[in-house]
Amino acid sequence: MFTIKPVQNEEAARDAVTACGGEYIPGAFVYEMRDSGSGALMGVSQFDIGETGVILTVLPEYKHRDDREAMFILLRSTMNFIDMSGAHICRAPYSAGDGALLRSAGFSDAGDSYTCDMSGMFSGHCGGKGAGGR
């Protein structure tokens, strides 16, 4: 099992992102995923909510753990938070993470990055978009 939670402390956020091989962006939101038993870092997501929209900047696993299901849950948790914040469109540069993982969560290739319209995705009905609901 694992836990996913926002990282409130900037130093801890920087440490988590860099430990997973990402480039930390000061002031960005960071979610971390840790093993419930050992507390070991499993992965992070970093995103920035700005005036021009939301950009998911990194989605790396810790030392290539290769736990696709856990990373999918981290990504969808991140997307749900973004959607609940009132921002429904999210972009992710190709360098953010595994393209297949992003597409499986509802992102599509926009030609210069991945993009996802999360409007209605987390509304709790079968018509929501995303994995299996398209």
Image: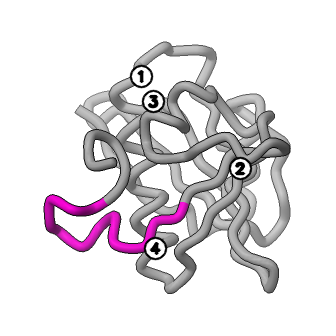
Q: Quadrant of residue 81?
A: bottom left
Spatial separation of the CA atoms under disc 2 and disc 3: 26 Å
Which residue sits at x=67%, y=40%? 109
Q: Residues within 10 Å of mark 2 (few under 14, many from 20)?
A: many
Residue placed under numbered mark 3 in the picture: 40
For badge 2, the amino acid type reads Ala
Q: Of discs 3 and 4, which sits in the foreground?
A: 4
Q: Does 10 sit left or right of 102 as displayed?
A: right
Which quadrant is home to the N terminus? top left
For badge 1, the amino acid type reads Arg
Between 117 and 78, the residue placed more toward the observer is 117
Tell me residue 79's x, y (percent).
Answer: 47, 60
Spatial separation of the CA atoms under disc 1 and disc 2: 18 Å
> Which numbered dot is residue 92?
2
Q: Quick one: label 2 or label 4, which is nearer the N terminus?
A: 4
Between 52 and 7, the residue placed more toward the observer is 52
Whether tag 3 and tag 4 are in contact, CB under 8 A, the answer is no
Q: Quick one: label 1 or label 2, which is nearer the N terminus?
A: 1
Q: Of discs 4 and 1, which sits in the foreground?
A: 4
> Which numbered dot is residue 83?
4
Q: Secondary structure at mark 2?
A: strand
> Which numbered dot is residue 37?
none
Which segment is the magenta one?
117-128
Most frequent secondary structure within the magenta stretch: loop
For badge 4, the amino acid type reads Asp
For badge 3, the amino acid type reads Ala
